[in-house]
Image (cartoon, rainbow, N blue to C red):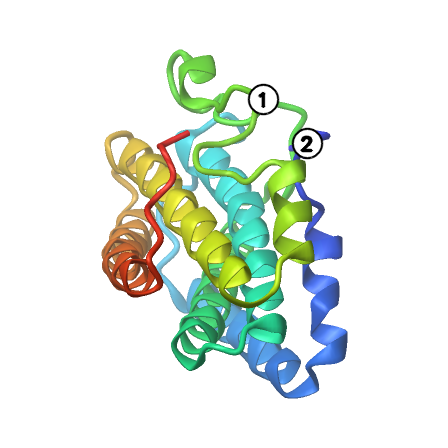
Amino acid sequence: MTADPADTSRRAGWGGWRGTPALALMLVLGLLVGAAGGWLAPRLALPGENSAEAGFARDMDNHHAQAIEMALIAFRETRDAEVRSHAVDMAMAQLTEVGTMQTWLRQWGLSPTSTDAPMSWLPAAERHLTGDGQMPGMASRQELARLRAAQGRDLDVLFLQLMIRHHLGGIHMIDGVLARTSNAEVRKAAGTMRTVQDAEVGNLTRVLTRLGGAPLPAS
């Protein structure tokens, strides 16, 4: 799938590893763990090119890439220990999941990208996109620029706001694939993603409240 022009580049987002070698090593290990988990899973009926499973894996890969980019920005720039801890935990968890989803696509004999529009694996796909045509919860180019420029409490609040909205959008996507797949491997991984992201929304909301911020409207 070709990323939306307003979307963030995966390569640009993950380039932040270079300034944080210890975190970079941790993230690479997370990606390898995710890939190993995918290869060791049972291989039953394989989803096809236009399946909900393939569309979900491709879209969530891109969705996670933006979350990792935002988490790396917060990890590098925040002075709040709790925000920093959540940022590194989320980057590790989501990179492991990226490894799993990329391995699925290889196992299924499918390309990691597609020319299909985002969310086209769901009925009435346009209803699931943001006003600027991005996947649910995605930050805009302007919001990412604001996050990169922010400092101190402003950085922490904006990061938490964007990540909470991002996770809620991810949960919407997870619910979409769970309603459409009978693939046991996908159902298990998606269910775990949902549980983790729901818990993180609660934790991030608590930190945001401590900092005197409020969640953004759903996108």
Residue 207, x across and y down, in percent: 31, 65
Residue 41 circle label: none
Q: Earlier in the sequence, mark 2 or mark 1?
A: 2
Residue type at mark 2 is Ala
Residue 114, x across and y down, in percent: 65, 31
Q: Residue at x 42, y 73 (%)?
A: 89
Residue 46, x across and y down, in percent: 43, 41
Q: Residue at x 49, y 21 (%)?
A: 120
Residue type at mark 1 is Asp
Q: Which residue is mark 2?
A: 6
Residue 90 is drawn in which quadrant? bottom left
Decide which of 128, 210 is in the foreground and name it.
Answer: 210
Disc 2 + disc 1, Cβ < 8 Å: yes
21 relative to 149, above or below: below
Decide which of 73, 94 is in the foreground and name it.
Answer: 73
Decide which of 63, 47 is in the foreground and name it.
Answer: 63
Q: Which residue is mark 1?
A: 132
Describe residue 25's horizontal placement relative to residue 123 as left or right.
Answer: right
Q: Quadrant of the C terminus?
A: top left
Residue 132 is drawn in which quadrant? top right
Q: CA distance from mark 2 to mark 1?
A: 8 Å
Decide which of 173, 35 is in the foreground and name it.
Answer: 173
Residue 62 is drawn in which quadrant? top right
Q: Provide the secondary structure element on which disc 2 rests.
A: loop
Q: Is residue 99 visible?
A: no
Q: Residue at x 55, y 40 (%)?
A: 139
Q: Residues within 10 Å of mark 2 (few under 14, many from 20)?
A: some
Q: Is residue 27 visible?
A: yes
195 relative to 46, above or below: below
Q: Quadrant of the N terminus?
A: top right
